[in-house]
Image: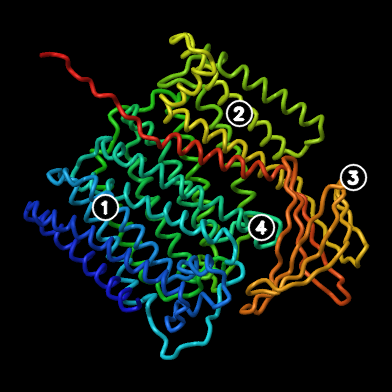
Amino acid sequence: MVTIGNISQFAAFFLAMAATVFILIGVMRNDARFIESGRRSIYGLALFTTTASIAMTYLFAIDNFQVEYVASYSDRALPFYYKLTSFWAGQKGSLLLWAWLLSIFSSIVAFNTRNELSSRTTPYIYLVLSGTLTFFLFLLSTLSNPFDLLNFIPSDGKGLNPMLQNPGMLFHPPTLFLGYIGFTIPFAYAIAAMVTGKLDASWLRKTRIWTLISWIFLTIGIILGCQWAYVELGWGGFWAWDPVENASFIPWLVATAYLHTAIIQEKRNMMKVWNMVLILLTFILCIFGTYLVRSGILQSVHDFGATGLGGFFIFFLVTVFLGSLYLIFESYRELRSESAIESFISRESTFLYNNVIFLSITFSTLLGTVFPLLSEAVTGKKITVGQPFFNQVNTPLFLLLLLITGICPLIGWRKASADNLRKNFLVPFLSASIGAMLLFIAGVREFYPLTSFSLSIFVAVTIFNEFRVGTLARKRLTGESVLTAFPRLLWRMRSRYGGYIVHLGIVILIVGITGSSAYKLEKQATLNKGESMKIGAYELRYDDFRGYRDRNREVYTADLAVLKDGSPAGTISPERRYYINAEQPTTEVSLRMTLMEDLYVTMPGIGKNEVITLKVTVNPLLVWMWIGAAIMVLGGIVAAIPVRRKKEVSNAA
């Protein structure tokens, strides 16, 4: 299998180069035969990367520790499903995963465009895809080969990092990669459109499904990462503005901005430059995120450390950036919109404001992430930017973005009239105002939480009003009942209303983030058996202590009785785990989750005579963050379902 994996990997690399050469010759000679050869080569390299991936998975499954990568990330005691996820635990395997997924995506594009070889743009789409694959397969074949052998056979492997032995390992990295890699497709179409001068909205329409699916996977990946950090790291939070967290969040921001302006180009033939810049920037930032993880230049609990690949990623990034910049300048005249925004108070203008805010958040997050590198270059000292910077800068921007999200549906296209503004804003404004007063009376007095909750009410009311108006309009036109009209409206106009569902999910997510951030309670205590600690309305009583062996770890757990407002509320059992191949023990979170709050308990210390140290956190409303995220993904799926137009069939003889 080692031989098969090596041969397959090298064969994929040579086929990627061959595809690039064939397509270049075909373009220069205007010869479809060479282009077809390049297209078929993409199928071949997908076959070989698939074979290499199967070989790598098999080597993990059979504990072949002569393979250096297997020995570094697995051991005999590791549960089988974690052996499979060890495939992408290190940078070598994750690069193979990247190349494999991109080759599959490229093959799908090659198949879907098999009858479009006469189009001027198609060869350039293939060229971008094969060129990107060549880069990643070059790294795998020359510098980061996962099939490299040790000159001896270890009796056992080093094992998987305990923090990676979590169900999140099954889903978070693959979904994040699917998001990253998926944006290569619209990037390839954008480059092809600029090279050939085909700058109408057709490239947008052809890549819409790719963009939405990539955005959905990137969203899922980020949220799963938040959930993983929440239940595994034991610090009571889900987001720390860590460089690697930011590396996935930054392209998500730009991609979300792009999805908004793409609507404007399709409807009004405007913002062509914006769209081109945003999709190119999304791809570049996806590569930059990959570089951050694999270069070792920034400290993070998530990265792979120094790998020696940083220089190659920088070269690729600079090449893509300069090439994209050149094409933007060359195409600028053709990209300029024929029509302009007619009024600063119009739906088009709110999309523009929306994107300015998205890019402002992107810039501040990027600046805070790379600031240690900038400070080291200027002063010689690496100054780290912490959470306070990101929170202080981005919180007002997020609130402003939330406000724009609520305003946009209330304003008409082209130019809004004063009468329409008064009519449309009245109910949402009154709802938000009444909500703010009730929240203030209930004790929500701090500026940011009060503003966030009030704006959430404002946006939710506007969204529900859009559903109400659309449903009633369909009811009047068709005579259907409300229960029939609503799902049919949603299905017929799923692109529009899927977007509203996404916005509703964001509102709910923000409610969860605001509640857990502003009103979190934390306390630490050391207890003997029979002793209790109190936090908020909760009391935790230490009843029992147990120890047992579980596969590749020794587990020690404390059983705690939970009382809320003096009444029994179940039990909770935090753990301390000692993995056989890990130097340091890990804490395992025990959660009591309700719609109102999470009771979050870890056991960071065990002393003599079974004395334990507990760290307890109460996170209000946090479950709504996960619910909101699920609704966001649902809305994205609804919006991504293709709309098939019925073909008119002539009855003429």
The image shows residue 424, relative to residue 351, as above or below, that is above
Q: Earlier in the sequence, mark 1 or mark 2?
A: 1
The image shows residue 393, relative to residue 381, as above or below, that is above
Give the residue number, with chain letter if any, for mark 2: 460
Give the residue number, with chain letter if any, for mark 1: 326
Give the percent coordinates (x, y) of residue 118.
12, 44
Question: Gap in Å between the C-alphas at discs 1 and 4?
Answer: 46 Å
Query: Taking 474 as reference, is 102 left or right?
Result: left
Q: Nearer the viewer, residue 33 or 71?
A: 71
Give the residue number, with chain letter if any, for mark 3: 567
Q: Earlier in the sequence, mark 1 or mark 4?
A: 4
Give the residue number, with chain letter if any, for mark 4: 231
Q: Earlier in the sequence, mark 4 or mark 3?
A: 4
Q: Amino acid at mark 3?
A: Ser
Q: Earlier in the sequence, mark 2 or mark 4?
A: 4
Give the percent coordinates (x, y) of residue 487.
49, 23
Determine whether label 4 and label 3 are within 8 Å by CB: no
